[in-house]
Amino acid sequence: MSTVPRIECIRLNKVYLDTRGERVVAFKDVSFQIQPGEFVTVIGPSGCGKTSLLYMLAGFESKTSGQMLVDGRPIEGPGADRAVVFQEYALFPWLNLRRNVEYGPRERGVSRDKMREAVDAMLVTVGLESAATRYPHELSAGMRQRAALARVLVNEPKILLMDEPFAALDAQTRLSLQRELSRLSKEMNLTIMFITHSVEEAVLLGDRVVVMTARPGQILADVPIQFARPRDPTAHEFSDCRREIEALLKRASTLTADTLHHNFAAQVTGASRE
Amino acid sequence: MAQPTSQAVAQEQSAVDEPLSRPWPNRLFASRVLRGLIVPAVIVAVWQLSSVTGWAPSASIPSPAAVIESWYDWIAGPVTPLAWYSGTWATYALLSLRRVAIGFAIASAAGATFGLMLGWYALVNDLFENFVNFLRAIPTTAWVPFVVFFFGIHEKAAISLIAFGAFFPIATNIAAGARQTPRTLIRAARMLGTPSRKVLWRVVLPSTLPAVFAGLRIGLGLSWVLVIVAEMLAVQGGLGYALWSAYQVNRLDLIVAAIISVGLFGLMSDWLLVRLSGLSLRWQRGLIGQ
């Protein structure tokens, strides 16, 4: 592709001091691109720096070195073009559902009529029109995450950064939210980076699955998932793909950025292209 | 489609609140207000009984009936130079109320503003934290001589003592609340387009509101303590002044009447504040224990 990638990271490094003041290398020399409209899922062992990576793209955390570009321009702090969906929903508890969704449009100074129209439409999209006057603590976990999704999508972001958004939901709710997200991402032409712990979720949703190694993290494999949506987790090709990612993840947990290139790089790229 | 669902939820919640069976004491005292009055009523009854039976000598402890009689004179008796207390209750009560209201208002405004800054801006915190902790460690009553020396026997002495004393619990509670603002909420606001200079107003303040009311409640309680101290030592008039005057003429019945008066005012003002917080913290209802 000759177009500018929506998200591009070039030899990105993140070092931070933990609570005891010790230096921790979260990840090392991470480079990747995400094209406009692509849905990329990221999976890796706990502590591999995937959340740090997401928060850096969101502008919440600073990079140590390297480049982070959105549409070719470096990231400077948080912005409404990069929406974030948190695992813990992060709805404002003092605002009712409608006010939560209105928060972004109000901050951006959208006119009252336009805002009302957009918010109404978005509440219908996520199926919460009847719960608009309820406060977050009066909503179920699934409804809260729908609300959090509505709150960011109403701003028509280009990029959606999602940090294990469905991890705390029950299986039923998770499945329906996964389906809706999959549909919405294509309808709204969203570029999505989605962090997950579930291989099944990664394969179900991703156009590509990025597998990261243990800390210090680095990208072990970047596997394209080519079969059509909506995907059927019981299909043969799905299970094959899932097995492949599971094998990669198993290997990823024994590797770090420091050991990766010396021993395994060649084998790994071979495996992922099979 | 939606209506039945929300109704079902409401029914489910009320079903949880209802006890499964209601034993007879619960049925008898179904009203919670009524139940709350039982203990005070028993205490007054025992008190009256012990006076009537002579178990408590009336010379040292006045009976409830005697207290009510003197209290009535204090409230409704003719104003006369012969008895300092007769008919002065309303005037004194208003004097105390006014001092608490002004002092507490100053403490609230200053304490809330300063507390938010202290909790949110690292620089303000570094500059003031130790100094505030030092001032907080001094019992406010220790300032009485200083305040009287400074203002003389004047309204300003009482009001500044209340304002100064109530300022600290309000400011420190709010500062603690502001420090605990969840980081994800700040991040959520930032990614939704709130510029960093507006985060204090948009996120920190609303998320601190429960702590604000907790601080105000403590501050209000302290205001009543300080108004009595100030009136005993620093200014003329007021319930604390009456309390001290009654002591000087050995009128225990009036002392008790004054104590109960102060208690009732404290209770009422606290109730008002709780109602007010209930209105602005509607979003928090049911949040406890979740």
Image (tube, coloured by chain):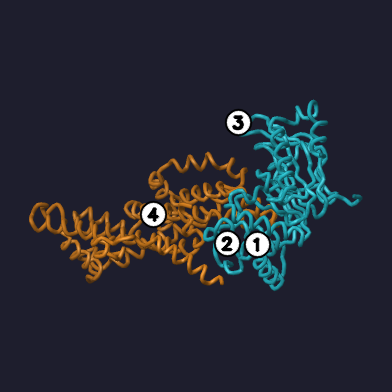
Chain colours: A cyan, B orange
Please name the amino acid that badge 3 sits on.
Arg
Tell me if residue A11 comes above or below residue B93 in the rendering. Answer: above
Q: How far apart are marks 4 and 1 (CA)?
A: 37 Å
Percent of width and height locating residue A10? 83, 40
Please name the amino acid that badge 1 sits on.
Tyr
Mark 3 sits on what residue? A20
On screen, residue B176 versus residue B221, left or right, reads right
Mark 4 sits on what residue? B221
Label 4 resides on the chain identified as B
Q: In which quarter of the image is residue B257?
A: bottom left
Label 3 resides on the chain identified as A
Q: How far apart are marks 2 and 1 (CA)?
A: 9 Å
Q: Say what secondary structure mark 3 lies in.
A: loop
Disc with the residue nearer the chain's start (3 vs 1):
3
Please name the amino acid that badge 2 sits on.
Leu
Tell me if residue A69 comes above or below residue B262 in the rendering. Answer: above
Residue ID at (88%, 50%): A4
Residue ID at (65%, 37%): A46
Q: Which mark is residue A238?
A: none
Mark 1 sits on what residue? A103
Camera-nearest residue between B146 and B16: B16
Q: How far apart are marks 3 and 4 (CA)?
A: 41 Å
Camera-nearest residue between A264 and A159: A264
Q: Residue A95 carries which label?
A: 2
